[in-house]
């Protein structure tokens, strides 16, 4: 089991990337904020199937957290992350400090429209996606990967990044990786560690509610009624619902009532105690 090489500066990352290019290797990038779980590891495995060398970035990006959010308490588990990445044979880890990514005087952000402005996450975390898009565009330009992979659990994030890479002509293939779930259906997330034992028992209702809603959409009930009933079920279970929304799976726009079920995605965000859970499902 060889440990991945740890790169801490953009210069070191560029040097590593250049060596891969000279050797004729295709490079896959897996952007993460660390606290890795099986979901992240499946992204590494996924990108390794279509490239020769995988670099995983581990960077808790301050600009995507609002001042009221969990930046300072976000789990940081670097040593165990490295261990997991050794097991799955990631070749490199890019782990910059904040000052390396945002040196003094940093003054540029990516401004977004389209799938970043559809009243889902953007409504509840208005500064989030410009922080994500800025750091992801930096990571893409630093690592110049052939492929970059992002989890479908953050479905709106994936749509925003695809759109941004296309609009800015960043020469990379953006790949989505399926959501991994615990045995009871709870979507894997680094934030699940915040759940108390009692909350952890309640949390799978999010996935169960999505599954039930998808089934009813397929049978053809009015979408607004399905959204309201799903939100009501979650509220009764003790969650505070930000949204349950049935959207076009590509644009994330509100679909026409006559849209083909297969073109739809159901997205949910709800808090359970201090933990905000998000999830989504294809119809
Ligand atoms: O999904 C995440 O973990 C983050 O938003 C990302 C894409 C690594 C950017 O910081």
Image: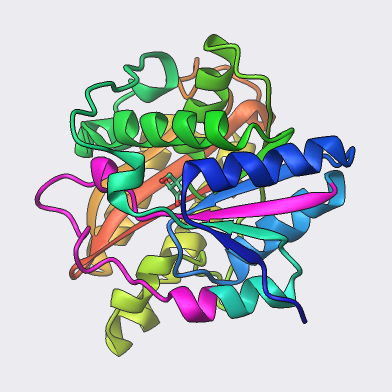
Q: Quadrant of the N terminus?
A: bottom right
Q: Is residue 214 visible?
A: no
In the depicted view, which residue is nearer to us: 204 or 35? 35
- Residue farthest left in this picture: 68
Q: Is 22 situated left or right of 127 in this image?
A: right
- Which of the 4 quarters of the picture holds residue 29? top right
Residue 48: percent from the left, percent from the top? 80, 53
Q: Quadrant of the C terminus?
A: top right
In the depicted view, which residue is nearer to us: 144 or 224? 144
Find the magenta span and give its range.
Answer: 52-81
For the point 70% across and 58% down, which residue is it? 44
Q: Is residue 186 above or below residue 154?
A: below
Count numbered badges in the picture.
Answer: 0
Is residue 69 rendered magenta in the image? yes
Task: State the colouring used for the structure image.
Answer: rainbow
Is residue 48 rendered magenta in the image? no
For the point 67% across and 67% down, which residue is it? 4
For the point 69% across and 41% down, which residue is it? 17
For the point 10% across and 52% down, which residue is it? 68
Residue 3: percent from the left, percent from the top? 68, 75
Q: Is residue 83 above or below residue 27?
A: below
- Residue farthest right in this picture: 24
Q: Is 52 situated left or right of 282 in this image?
A: right
Q: Is 67 situated left or right of 49 in this image?
A: left
Residue 136: percent from the left, percent from the top? 46, 35
């Amino acid at each position: 089991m060889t440990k991945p090489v740890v790169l801490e500066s953009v210069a070191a990352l560029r040097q590593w990337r250049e060596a891969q290019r000279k050797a004729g290797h295709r490079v896959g990038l897996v952007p993460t904020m660390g606290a890795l779980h099986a979901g992240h590891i499946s992204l590494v495995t996924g990108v390794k199937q279509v490239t020769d060398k995988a670099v995983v970035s581990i960077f808790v990006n301050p600009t995507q957290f609002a001042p009221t959010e969990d930046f300072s308490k976000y789990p940081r588990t670097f040593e165990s992350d490295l261990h997991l990445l050794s097991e799955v044979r990631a070749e490199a880890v890019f782990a910059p400090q904040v000052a390396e990514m945002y040196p003094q005087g940093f003054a540029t952000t990516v401004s977004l429209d389209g799938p970043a402005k559809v009243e889902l996450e953007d409504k509840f975390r208005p500064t989030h996606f410009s922080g994500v898009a800025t750091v992801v565009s930096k990571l893409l330009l630093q690592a110049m990967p052939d492929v970059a992979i992002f989890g479908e659990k953050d479905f709106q994030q994936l749509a925003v990044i695809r759109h941004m890479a296309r609009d800015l002509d960043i020469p990379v293939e953006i790949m989505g990786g399926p959501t991994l779930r615990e045995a009871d259906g709870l979507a894997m997330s680094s934030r699940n560690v915040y759940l108390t034992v009692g909350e952890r028992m309640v949390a799978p209702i999010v996935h169960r509610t999505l599954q039930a809603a998808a089934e009813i959409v397929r049978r053809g009930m009015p979408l607004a009624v399905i959204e309201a009933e799903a939100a009501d079920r979650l509220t009764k279970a003790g969650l505070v619902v930000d949204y349950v929304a049935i959207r076009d799976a590509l644009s994330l726009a509100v679909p026409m009532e006559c849209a083909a079920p297969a073109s739809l995605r159901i997205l949910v965000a709800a808090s359970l105690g201090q933990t905000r859970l998000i999830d989504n499902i294809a119809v």
